[in-house]
């Protein structure tokens, strides 16, 4: 059997780095996607040193920029002919309403459109993979989310946590819709990693978040090793080889909030995402 190739976004830090490291330890060929060459190279060197697996590649991409994702998608096609597993993991929360280079609100653009567009450009490679899987890192934070299509980019009001919760609900709806479109071709699942002591929100969150997170980390949060466990399970375990369209927590399927099961909203979000990215459906790159 050929070596399994697994791509992880946001692989230089936190849950993504441990996911990459653990899968490298299992012998997979790892493709780390990071935005900073310096941080990515350092993390790659750590992973190679700690696992003894030299099959670890680094690709650069700013997942908040559609041009950068397109450039990455084209470079990936030049370099590789197939992909077995895609782990959409990179994400963030932002203290202030800010905009990407494409003029989109950052939380929605990075956390949802980043997953949507990256996946589109990698679908052909995944179709050429062996038993391909897509794993989307979502969150229990989806539960209080409202999905207001007139406020997807916080046009009416910006509250960092509400914007984050909505983006994590979008991860679930994207998972459900893609799973139904890819039935019999590949599996698509999403997960809550737990409340994990990482860099999350420490640099980009509001002053209050930056103050609260280290305190919470000390008392309530789990380690990145535990936080990566469900991503790793979904990426490789034979137990879930045939499961698709599901939300997992602690390696078990869990029911989402009712909105996370609303297939009409999932279809509407898909259509809006196609419009906002201008991507041709199913990974046809127009250049
Ligand atoms: N930590 C938790 O308690 C928790 C709970 C539920 C869900 N999650 C989810 O878990 C995922 C990983 O979070 P984490 O806790 O591991 O956070 P983290 O330590 O902050 O790691 C986030 C990763 O995403 C990367 N990233 C951020 N913006 C990017 C961009 N524009 N382009 C490319 N990469 C970018 C970061 O790169 P840089 O190092 O360059 O910033 C970093 O590698 C996120 O989707 C988050 O929503 C986390």
Image (spheres, helix red, strand yellow):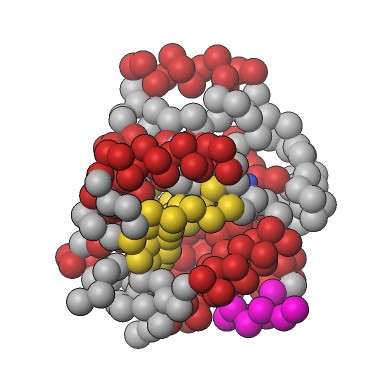
| Rendering coords of residue 37 (x, y %) | 58, 43
Residue occupying the point 39% across, 21% down: 217
| Rendering coords of residue 282 (x, y %) | 57, 80
Q: Can see residue 135?
A: no
The residue sitting at the bottom extreme is: 184
Between 265 and 244, the residue placed more toward the observer is: 244
Left or right, 269 with respect to 259, comes to right
Q: The N terminus is located in which quarter?
A: bottom left
Q: Is residue 254 magenta?
A: no
Q: The C terminus is located in which quarter?
A: bottom right
| Rendering coords of residue 172 (x, y %) | 47, 59
Quadrant in the picture for residue 254: bottom left
* Stretch of the chain drawn in magenta: 279-287
Between 95 and 128, the residue placed more toward the observer is: 128
What secondary structure do most residues of the magenta stretch adopt?
A: loop
Q: How many marks?
A: 0
Q: With respect to residue 221, does 178 lie above or below?
A: below
Residue occupying the point 51% across, 43% down: 40
Left or right, 76 with respect to 62, comes to left
Quadrant in the picture for residue 28: bottom left
The residue sitting at the left extreme is: 239
Left or right, 139 with respect to 201, comes to left
Q: With respect to residue 267, does 153 lie above or below?
A: above
Residue occupying the point 68% across, 29% down: 95
Left or right, 275 with respect to 222, comes to right
| Rendering coords of residue 178 (x, y %) | 48, 73
Residue occupying the point 59% across, 78% down: 283
Quadrant in the picture for residue 117: bottom right
Q: Can see residue 17?
A: yes
Q: Is residue 281 magenta?
A: yes
């Amino acid at each position: 059997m050929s070596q399994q190739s697994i791509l992880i976004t946001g692989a230089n830090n936190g849950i993504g780095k441990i996911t990459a490291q653990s899968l490298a330890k299992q012998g997979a060929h790892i493709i780390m996607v990071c935005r900073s060459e310096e941080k990515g190279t350092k993390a790659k060197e750590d992973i190679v040193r700690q696992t003894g697996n030299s099959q670890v590649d680094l690709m650069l991409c700013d997942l908040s920029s559609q041009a950068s994702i397109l450039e990455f998608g084209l470079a990936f096609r030049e370099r590789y002919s197939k992909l077995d597993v895609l782990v959409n993991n990179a994400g963030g929360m932002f203290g202030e309403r800010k905009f990407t280079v494409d003029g989109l609100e950052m939380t929605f653009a990075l956390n949802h459109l980043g997953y949507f567009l990256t996946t589109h450009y990698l679908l052909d490679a995944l179709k050429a993979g062996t038993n391909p899987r897509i794993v989307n890192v979502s969150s229990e934070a989806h539960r209080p989310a409202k999905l207001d299509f007139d406020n997807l980019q916080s046009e009416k009001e910006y509250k960092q946590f509400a914007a984050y919760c909505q983006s994590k609900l979008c991860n679930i709806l994207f998972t459900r819709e893609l799973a139904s479109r890819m039935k019999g071709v590949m599996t698509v699942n999403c997960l809550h990693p737990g409340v994990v002591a990482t860099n999350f929100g420490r640099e980009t969150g509001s002053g209050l978040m930056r103050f609260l997170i280290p305190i919470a980390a000390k008392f309530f949060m789990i380690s990145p090793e535990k936080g990566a466990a469900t991503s790793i399970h979904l990426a490789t375990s034979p137990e879930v080889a045939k499961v698709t369209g599901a939300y997992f927590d602690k390696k078990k399927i869990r029911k989402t909030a009712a909105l996370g099961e609303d297939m009409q909203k999932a279809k509407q979000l898909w259509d809006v995402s196609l419009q906002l990215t201008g991507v041709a459906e199913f990974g046809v790159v127009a250049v």
